[in-house]
Image (tube, rainbow, N blue to C red):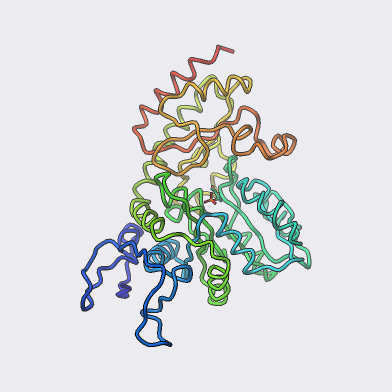
Amino acid sequence: MSLNIQYEGFQTKAVHVGEEPDFREGATGDVVVPIHLSTTFARQKVAIPTAGYEYVRTQNPTRKALEVKLASLENAKYGLAFSCGLAAETTVLLSLLNPGNHIIAFDDLYGGTKRLFDKIFIKLGFEVSYVDATDSSRVAEAIKPATKLVWIETPSNPLLKVSDIKAIANITRQHGLILAVDNTFLSPYFQKPLDLGADIVVHSSTKYIGGHSDVLGGVVMFNDDNFHERLQYHQNAIGAVISPFDSYLTLRGVKTLALRMEQHQKNALDIAHYLEQHPKVSKVIYPGLKSHPQYNLLRLQTTGYGGVLSFEIKGTIADAERFLESLKIFALAESLGGVESLIELPSVMTHASVDKEVREKIGITDTLIRMSVGVEDVKDLISDMKQAFEQIKIL
Ligand SMILES: *Cc1c(COP(=O)(O)O)cnc(C)c1O
């Protein structure tokens, strides 16, 4: 593979990088990288692994193709693929930090990341402070001598708060800290945190990168050679790697990332406008609306707004539940980023583990609904919502 072709465009890279046909003697010129299931690789000389491959946990050609492709999409020098987003996060933390180190994290993080910090890493002797990272000065104020890493997610989940990656990167650089950005919500198609000064990008490729709600995975991308040595060592030593088959499914999914993101966004914007004027809706949160508090910042640091939006129904939690249970096309389900539209009630589903007081304080009310808009025909999605709204009594 790796013929050293330099591709320019995002879609060209998404289709071709890592999967260039192999024309060497005996090779067959596949235009799709094969699923290499072999767990071990034979060699002819004791000290020379064939093409660098030894054992599947350490490296595998299908996973390698995925890592190379995803790194190119994120404008990164290196990419490493894991069994899921949380495995990727765990490996980053164990590779780069030591017990006693202090982490500054955004207070509106993916619930699983917060649980990883609070229930696992704090027990191991790490310290974590949560701040509202939409105000970069809060990040600077939280720095202590033991601080090593800042962890943000932008836009955040489910409130779609946006933090200023460049401004935070300036702070972390001045203090010699590592800035990690979870880029799951916008995907590299709309946002490239490394170009804005972040040191590490993490994704749950289970979401938009895979894109079809059928494969679990996680990726870490970065440019630093020293990080590469440490992360690759820990990836092999810890072993939470993505399988060859899941690498193939993710490769297959990511080829249409750009097409899907455009359609997710188009549909999401139409739905946001529909909801904004709806008498039974009190609030719509979507980064593509001018009413979003960080609309201008977002326009500077991204090329799009994504396909996730949240809104609040006027009424009680029972009204919200009736609305959700009446939908026919939207699947009432956790997760996001697939071709099918998903909808959920964070206070009862994804964010049930967050204390009610904390939830209310940051804005996750009982009737806040989060939607991952799929790529269906938007008029069908709006008709579905219309009939579900009719099930709620006039207030
Ligand atoms: C889903 C998700 C994760 C965790 O990824 P898994 O693949 O489920 O382990 C991390 N961050 C964000 C923003 C997510 O949406």
Above or below residue 269? Residue 180 is below
Q: Position of residue 363 (x, y in %)?
A: 66, 36
Q: Quadrant of the N terminus?
A: bottom left
> What residue is rendered at 53% in x and 76% in y?
225
Above or below residue 50? Residue 140 is above
Q: Is residue 283 left or right of residue 363?
A: left
> Picture quarter containing residue 362?
top right
Q: Is residue 215 left or right of residue 121?
A: left
In the rendered image, the residue lying farthest to the right is 145
Nearest to the observer: residue 368 or residue 58:
58
> Picture quarter containing residue 142?
bottom right
Q: Position of residue 250 (x, y in %)?
A: 39, 55
> What residue is rendered at 30% in x and 75% in y?
3
Q: Position of residue 134 (x, y in %)?
A: 65, 49
Nearest to the observer: residue 68 or residue 23:
23
Above or below residue 120? Residue 17 is below
Above or below residue 210? Residue 277 is above
Nearest to the observer: residue 97 or residue 4:
97
> What residue is rendered at 71% in x and 60% in y?
103
In the rendered image, the residue lying farthest to the top is 394
Q: Position of residue 395 (x, y in %)?
A: 59, 13
Q: How many marks?
A: 0
